[in-house]
Amino acid sequence: MPYDDLRGFLGTLEKEGQLLRISEEVLPEPDLAAAANATGRIGEGAPALWFDNVKGFTDARIALNVHGSWANHALALGLPKHTPVKEQVEEFARRWDAFPVAPERREDAPWRENTQEGEGVDLFSILPLFRLNDGDGGFYLDKAAVVSRDPEDPENFGKQNVGTYRLEVIGRNRLAIQPVPVHDVAIHLRKAEEKGEDLPIAITLGNDPVMTIVAGMPMAYDQSEYEMAGALRGAPAPIATAPLTGFDVPWGSEVVIEGVIESRERQIEGPFGEFTGHYSGGRRMPLIRIDRVSYRTNPVFESLYLGMPWTEVDYLVGPNTCVPLLKQLRAEFPEVQAVNAMYTHGLLVIISTKKRYGGFAKAVAMRAMTTPHGLGYVSTVIVVDEDVDPFNLPQVMWAMSAKVNPSGDVVIVPNLSVLELAPAAQPAGITSKMIIDATTPVSPDNRGSFATPAKDLPETREWAAKLQRLMAEARD
């Protein structure tokens, strides 16, 4: 059964041995973030963490690392916790094909239990806020699903965006948001500001695990995240109507924040320790005025640590970056076999493909750079043959070692767009991009001596599956 809220998923994690309750008193800083940071250093089966004894907070319930292992990611999709990562990505891609699945509207959302409005809004009285990295400029809501609508087409359900963006708390009823230009909320804000209007917004915290996955997914502008969540869940996503904005929000959220991004108002936001493993500096960013907060009694505050990989964010946005790129590339190049965009939200992508003719692999790589996600993120593409598993790094390294002649197989394209957070960009937002063609040349490209490759034995795949099954049984 799919999960309708965060609490249901936490219950399953606990039953599966994937939730660790920390009963001893801890400090909000540095203990909370340090513990979440540590989960990325103890192996791929790391648990979610639960804290309810935090010094200085009288009534805190904090969940960290909820998606922060392949075991937890599998359980979020309703798969056995030992499902290998490649199989998780393949299942993700299979469910994608069911899109769209219309959501189910429900009444009596649990977040309607309590309300703060207008001048009575005080986030500090609702959320146990803490910094994630020492150099952060303040407290952040870094695992929220932010809902906005296209001001020019507000009734278009597909253009209603649900996305994850960094949000700095700069006052009891004020936030700063960083809308990356290629993201949908930035498009919505630009349209609103061109009309001289504020942009209404809803921010939801503590969502069901699939909704959180979908909120970080690079989808087409007019594709509905709720309809994709239904496809991935195998059942309609439950939604409810936010009381102030009228927006569609997840039914099971812990907290729903409503307000507006104020037109043409800017304030310094940051610095923040980002998914790139580096701090991004302070920049002038749009401001959110909070007009209403609805929240469950005793809300669970869900946050994630992000920094030098791997951390929870890498598990969270790995498969949901691979699959959209795979589907978009296959629509034009059916020869594409698999896409591994696990690394730093797809700043580097590894693609395996068959080739129609010489030079084909480079064409696939260039298309990856011009997908909706590629325009802002994909900086390096490694292309390998169809018999190389892009999720098997030793195989990828072999292909690069044995098949790359730098004089003809490495292509540098200067002065292309990238998100401003990319630390290697110079100036911010501009970078050179690189293609590494690690495929076997095919006619009319007749370079090299690749006539007698050593292939896997025919029985190897069957034995690999058998060994994985026996290892999983031994662990249980």
Image (cartoon, rainbow, N blue to C red):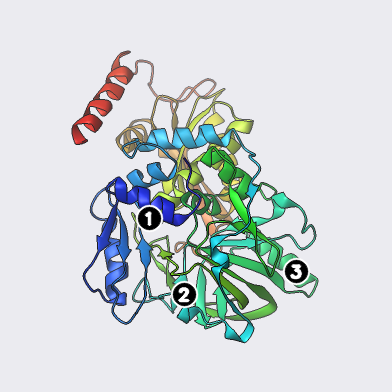
98 w.r.t. 44: above or below: above
Q: Amino acid at mark 1?
A: Val
Q: Which mark lies nearer to you, 2 or 1?
A: 1
What kind of element bears circle 2? Answer: loop
- First-in-chain label (1 vs 3): 1
Q: Position of residue 228 (x, y in %)?
A: 59, 44
475 w.r.t. 178: above or below: above
Q: Amino acid at mark 3?
A: Ala
Left or right of 291 on screen, residue 398 = left
* Of 439 and 189, the residue lying toward us: 189
Residue 411 appears in view: no
The Cα–Cα distance between marks 2 and 3, rounded to whole angstroms, is 26 Å
Q: Position of residue 257 (x, y in %)?
A: 58, 70
Q: Which residue is mark 1?
A: 66
Q: Amino acid at mark 2?
A: Gly
Locate residue 453: give its quadrant.
Answer: top left
* Of 163 and 276, the residue lying toward us: 163
Q: Which residue is mark 2?
A: 281
Q: Which residue is mark 3?
A: 192
